[in-house]
Image: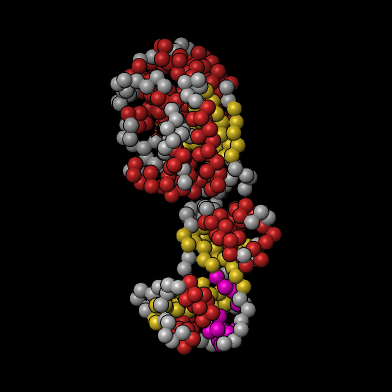
Amino acid sequence: MTEINTQNILIIRYGEIALKGMNKPYFEKTLLRRIRAAMAQAVQSDGGVRIAADGGLLIACGPALEDAAAEERLIRQILKVFGVSTVSKAWRIQARELTDIRAAAAAWMEQRLREGCPVTFKVFGKRADKTYPITSPELAADIGEAILEAYPDRVRVDVKNPEVSLYVHLRRKDVLIFDDSLKGFGGLPLGTNGKGLVLLSGGIDSPVAAWLMAKRGMQIEAVHFHSYPYTSKRAEEKVCDLAEILSSYCGTVKVHIVNLLPAQEALAAKCPDSEMTILVRRFMVRIAEKIALREGAGFLITGENLGQVASQTAEGIAVTDRASTLPILRPLIAMDKVDIMALAQEIGTYETSILPYEDCCTVFLPKHPSTKPTLPRIEASESLLGAPEAIEAIEAEVLSSETLFESGRVR
Ligand code: ATP
Ligand code: MG
């Protein structure tokens, strides 16, 4: 059989960006930047691998891809980049002769046979270079025959349910050969859709909410409220661990850590016990808004989910909403808990989220929380704290406790 020079490459496809009109170059450029940064993390320096847009695809190549372990690391990192829909390991050959393409396709198949499993296959031909003298179906049939000839006792064609779907993509300057593709998360490249400040508790929901917004291109910053000494330092560390996990998808995540205890104590001393949860939540939102405005974030993000707990009734959410002039994004609002948990597992936050450390919301937890608060009632309760300046003073005290944690590496 003809010896043929094959180059290991990765084909990276983007989903939704392909649908963009005038803005496509901007999205593509941002995506390339994100992938380069992700690759640099996988192989120390990205010197070993280059990536460029090429005929509606992104193609990565370079010496790092000749090392199987480095290649695996690269793929794992690239699949985490929002905007990437799929990644395929592929061969690129420069040859134009059909005999060379046949030989390369047979050699690809042999790789698969060496791995043990496949016996059935189907070839998909794609002739992007219309000057090439045979059509796509003819190309597929020809390559199929070549593979059958090369391994007559070991493979057979199955057009309905093949174990290997082999793609031979004939382009103007090269030929790409690949089979399966690994699924990324899709979405849009980070940084293409504003910045949001997530209210990050140590629970299951809020990290998932942040991840979902980041997947739509939103840059993420976080605020965590604790009630030290009622809550432990371990609870804070858990939130930093969650931010660290998030940062593997969305670059540096800055976490503002503030002690909400002064607000909780003032509320506990003066306001109705049944309204504690909602009153505390409104304090969180007001303080988060101040941080967001300072940090240039145009949105707040929470893990709220309709009906999940007493503070997340329709009425509770409506009253919480009114505490902020910034839009509050609640990407989990209509999801079922089991689906949120499954997503938390998929993105890797679940195991950390379920560690049993106390949350500041459990301090001063009311025995009978109000589930149908109204804005006038809640505002009346807040006025028990004193004039607006008194509330401002409490907020300033809370903010003065702020410390910062920065997770992840800059992408
Ligand atoms: P989670 O799993 O995200 O903690 P939850 O089901 O426990 O959510 P709540 O405790 O009612 O629900 O919190 C609702 C939302 O309020 C959270 O998703 C989060 O965005 C925010 N929040 C709650 N507690 C805190 C906290 N200690 N610090 C920052 N944000 C918080
Ligand atoms: Mg919680």
**Residue visible at 57% across and 57% down?**
73
Residue 48 lies within the magenta run: no
Give the image quadrant in which the ligand numbered 1 is located.
Answer: top left
266 or 90: nearer the eye?
Answer: 90
270 or 25: nearer the eye?
Answer: 270
Residue 298 appearing in the image: no
**Residue 49 quadrant:** bottom right
Figure check: 322 above or below 75: above
User: Which segment is the magenta one?
Assistant: 90-105
346 or 136: nearer the eye?
Answer: 346
- The coloring applied to the image is secondary structure
**Residue 373 quadrant:** top left
Quadrant location of the N terminus in the rendered image? bottom right
Return the x and y of residue 78 as percentages of the image width and height. Answer: 55, 57
**Residue visible at 38% across and 14% down?**
271
Return the x and y of residue 361 as percentages of the image width and height. Answer: 42, 26
Residue 118 appearing in the image: yes
